[in-house]
Amino acid sequence: MLSFAQPFFLLLLLILPALWIWYLRVGRHREGSVRYSALELIPIAALRSGQRKIFSLHILWGAVLLLGILALARPVVSNTLHETHTDIIDILLVIDQSSSMLAQDFEPNRLEAVKDVAKSFIADRTGDRLGIIVFAGESFVQCPLTTDTDVLIDFTDQIEIVAKEFDGTAIGMAVANAINRLRGSDAKSRIMILLSDGSNNRGEIDPLTAAELSAKFGIKIYTIGAGTQGYAPYPFEDNWGRITIQKVPVEMDEETLREIANLTGGQFFRATDNESLEHIYAEINELERTEIEVTEYQNIHELYPWFTIPATILALLYLLLARGIYGKFV
């Protein structure tokens, strides 16, 4: 970008039209001349040649002044370079897919509500690496760590309630599986967001033991307990294939989820409806923001030699013509 380091010198440009007006009105009548009794005695070709010489000298001198003023204003070209350094965060969404996630205290049920909020969370984490682990009686990698948000959203849509033979809640195994995926990461921050609506009743690893292991690897866990207090509406299928909604007691080990968060430096949240669930993911989103460091470099190139050198050449040409070739002494 072109700019001037000392732009106030540009005010001197106003002198140029003022000098030209003064010359037309006063200056040209004061130039040294040879008097003739009649102009008819001078050939027209000689008159026109003299006028061209005088005009060319004035143009040269005006150009010298113009270039000199522009050089005094110090024209510069500056280029701004931005160097961006991003500290990405590796995030694993650990989502319960046990049959209890069909409870309808969320709209339309717990699992679908979690999927919708998770997709919004994923879409807002551009640049970070995210992955999904689902669990019930066992845990599975739904999607490995990736920066491709479209793929992540597609895999989130595919999460379904597990078959009866895999039902249950193995929180400890899910955390251990997530640790295995995150422990080799070189990201500055590694976190998992664990959402469950029940208490651990399956798996070989105790949830608190897994949490202690997570803390040793520096992996923070945010835990979310999904479900209302007391009872929740749950769909049942009768012998004739009809779906009926019945109230069932909510069994959630909130104490264990809270302790998992405390052991790893995370936080525990309780979601009782769609709105509170959205608020929780939004809060975690703000707590774990990617740090972007931008360093700005500015290269400045002085352009005044492009004006002083031509000005010097034109000034020498002026002297050569005025004092030599044209024979006009000034």
Image: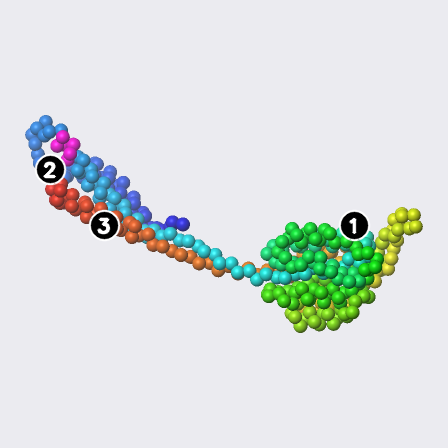
Q: Say whether residue 145 is left or right of residue 58.
A: right
Q: Quadrant of the C terminus?
A: top left
User: Viewer-proximal residue, 8 or 212?
Assistant: 212
Identify the mark at residue 312; answer none if there is no mark. Answer: 3
| Marker disc for residue 81 | none
Q: Residue 191 is drawn in which quadrant? A: bottom right
Question: Which residue sits furthest top?
Answer: 40
Amino acid type of the residue that numbered disc 1 sits on in the rendered structure: Pro
Residue 250 in the image: state x and y as whole percent.
84, 60
Circle 1 sits in a helix, a strand or a loop, which is it?
loop
- For residue 90, above or below residue 11: below
**Residue visible at 82% across and 54% down in the picture:** 103
Magenta stretch? 45-50
Give how far apart the Cα atoms at labels 3 and 2 are: 29 Å
From the top left corner, tell me how far across and down residue 101 is, in percent. Answer: 80, 56
Indicate the position of residue 19 as horizontal and vertical percent values: 24, 42
Furthest-right residue in view?
239
- Three-letter code for the amino acid on which mark 2 is drawn: Ser
Residue under the image location 13 percent in, 29 percent down: 44
Q: Is residue 49 left or right of residue 102?
A: left
Q: State the CA–CA distance, disc 2 to disc 1.
A: 103 Å
In the picture of the structure, the residue carrying the numbered disc 1 is: 108
